[in-house]
Amino acid sequence: MYYALARRQAAREWWLIFASLVFYGWWDIRFVPLLAGQTIVTWLLAELAIRKGWRWPLYLAIVANLSVLGLFKYIDFGATILAQVTGLEFAKASLILPIGISFYTFELVSYLVDRLRGTAPRYSFRVFGLFIALFPHLIAGPIMRHNEIIPQFAYDPLRTGVYERIGRGLILFLIGFIEKFFIADQLAPIVDPVFAEATQTVPVFSLASAGALAFALQIFFDFAAYSNMAMGIGLMFGFMLPVNFNVPYRAVNLRDFWRRWHITLSRWLRDYVYIALGGSREGVGVYIWATLVTMGLCGLWHGAGWTFILWGLGHGIGLLVCRFWQHYGPPLPALAAWAITLTFVVLLFVLFRAADLAAAGNMFAGLMGQGGLGALWPAATLVPILIAGAIALFKVPTYEWAMRIQPSLPVAIGFVAIAVFAVLEVGQGAPVSFIYFQF
């Protein structure tokens, strides 16, 4: 239908908005009015600010959007903290977290802040609504900027290269599909039992190390898979979505890691939090403060819990150490720098995955051998970790590879065969949700 309406810009954009809302409502139709309401209210307040020359509607819209996010995502966490501090009991709201709310709220806020800065143009409601609702990136990113995607809505979908874009988009989607179901999901049977055991006792070193390493690989392939599938679908519609991962486990320091991991979130935090707090321009004290606050918020954005906050703060401290070492410490050999960085990242992911601080403590105790050494990894553990690790380290960046591959009949036949095999294999088991859907 989209390509049938290709020559009619308004019609094809309205169709994409409708299709995106249907896609979103397929998960839980009750939250479609919330998504639509946040979008409409944000646009109306931005329009009011433009027409009257006022700034307060923009501030109001920012507060309103963040308040909605806080209500659904953090109200129970806040109630728990208040109960611990005051000794009083507070009833939990136990609200269902609308899928994608953390992502589209950040997109709404970024537009509003850019309006305050005078760097965002005025948009019609149609293109603004499509910017937020566009289904490939709606539920788990990439976190888009208005100026990255809205100008592309005017491009003719049938412009030169349409079949190549569709073909390369299908390749990207298939690669993401394989990363999810044949790599990430195959690591789950290694990860889940270990972290479940850690809620009760200290696991042996062999299990704790396998669980920690497997989860670091699982979350990478799980999230990178969704990002590749989103970019692939976007490309099939003629849109270029931003790259979200660039082989992050090759990073040789933590600053390098965050330039490669969840790139669109890193950019958002840098541009709208870190720089706003002073960044590195206002002296050492401000730099330390800005870094810790930014990464603490990064952790809180991922989840309402102390484990996520400590994960973010851990990365903040690591970034500070990295920065000061680069200024005052001796240069490290590349291999040593890579090993230290990867070890640090894997260990902090224990906090990210653990059910609570007690479980994280048991995992770290297990990694220190306090539960015993345990047996050598069996083949069912060793082989998936080795394969996933090798791919994570040595593969060509997916988007770069998909754009570089030369179309040919053997390539087409090969990908069709892989697609058929993948669909048949996946159809045999229960579907597993993407990890980042919970954020």
Image: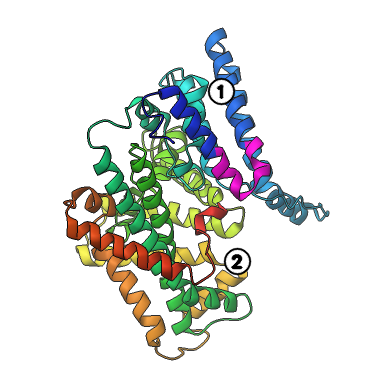
Q: Earlier in the sequence, mark 2 or mark 1?
A: 1
Q: CA distance from mark 2 to mark 1?
A: 41 Å
Quick check: 90 left or right of 231?
Answer: right
Between residue 126 and residue 203, name the one nearer to us.
126
What's the residue type where badge 2 is placed?
A: Leu
Instruction: Please give the label number shown on residue 43.
Output: 1
Asked whether the residues under the numbered discs 2 and 1 touch, taking CB atoms below 8 Å apart as contact, a structural biologist would say no
Furthest toward the bottom, the residue is: 375
What's the residue type where badge 1 is placed?
A: Trp
Mark 2 surroundings within 10 Å by alpha-carbon count, few (fewer than 14), some (14 through 19), many (20 or more): some
Say what secondary structure mark 2 lies in.
Answer: helix
Furthest toward the right, the residue is: 88
Say what secondary structure mark 1 lies in.
Answer: helix
Residue 32 within the magenta-colored segment of the rendering: yes
Instruction: Please give the label number shown on residue 169.
Output: none
Quick check: 327 left or right of 306?
Answer: left
Q: Position of residue 279 (x, y in %)?
A: 40, 37
Q: Position of residue 244 (x, y in %)?
A: 36, 48
81 versus 221 height, above or below: above
Quick check: 186 left or right of 101?
Answer: left
Residue 122 within the magenta-colored segment of the rendering: no
| Residue at screen point 36% across, 81% down | 382
Question: Is any atom of residue 132 visible in this view?
Answer: yes
| Main secondary structure found in the magenta portion | helix
Check disc 2 and report the residue beneath it.
Answer: 357
| Residue at screen point 30% across, 32% down | 158
**From the viewer's perspective, is the residue at label 2 or at label 1 nearer?**
1
Find the magenta span and give its range: 21-34
414 versus 75 height, above or below: below
Question: Which quadrant, please, contains the N terminus?
Answer: top left
Q: Position of residue 337 (x, y in %)?
A: 26, 63
